[in-house]
Image (cartoon, rainbow, N blue to C red):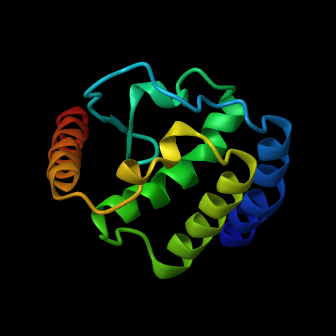
Amino acid sequence: MFKLIEIGFQKFVVKRVFKKYRNSLPTTTAYDNLKPKYHILAGSLVWEDEGIAECHPKLGNAFRYVLRYRTYLISRELSDTKNTNKRNKQTFELAKKYFPNWVGFDKSRCTYNAELVDRLKRFQKVSEWNIDKIS
């Protein structure tokens, strides 16, 4: 039942949110040598200039799937099931349709990068450590 609700969310709500906020994310950056941060809810890398933190909460929530798939492209490591990854890919492609020039789709942020993989693993380790410390 939960899977059907999640699939329905991605197919209906995400598309509607993307249409509403079409082309509202930054297309250029004013930063040099920007380092990624860790988006704990998406388990993904984000860059400060991408406008995710500043966007409407509904758009930010929908973009978690996009960020998740982009992190897969960077690391080439599947931490989700294949079905989830397939839905994330569909959402990623849908986002490219509605935000084609978004700075987050820059090739350097969507292709395998060993340095970013190392940084991601460190972020994940610290995140897990913090969660363990709380519980």
Figure quadrant of residue 128: top left
Taking the spot 67% from the left edge, 66% from the top edge, the residue there is 2
Q: Nearer the viewer, residue 84 or 45?
A: 45
Q: Nearer the viewer, residue 116 or 13?
A: 116
Apparent side of residue 57 relative to residue 110 in the rendered image (left or right): right
Viewport quadrant of the N terminus: bottom right
Figure quadrant of residue 51: top right
Measured along the vertical axis of the image, is residue 91 above or below residue 14?
Answer: below
Circle count = 0
Residue 89 spot, x, y in % from top left? 57, 68
Taking the spot 78% from the left edge, 63% from the top edge, the residue there is 11
Apparent side of residue 69 relative to residue 58 in the rendered image (left or right): left
Apparent side of residue 50 relative to residue 128 in the rendered image (left or right): right
**Residue that extends furthest to the bottom in the rendered view of this protein:** 82
Q: Nearer the viewer, residue 14 or 109?
A: 109
Measured along the vertical axis of the image, is residue 100 above or below residue 57?
Answer: below
Residue 102 spot, x, y in % from top left? 59, 40
Measured along the vertical axis of the image, is residue 133 above or below residue 100?
Answer: above
Taking the spot 49% from the left edge, 42% from the top edge, the residue there is 104
Viewport quadrant of the C terminus: top left
Residue 52 spot, x, y in % from top left? 55, 31
Residue 18 spot, x, y in % from top left? 77, 45
Taking the spot 66% from the left edge, 29% from the top edge, the residue there is 57
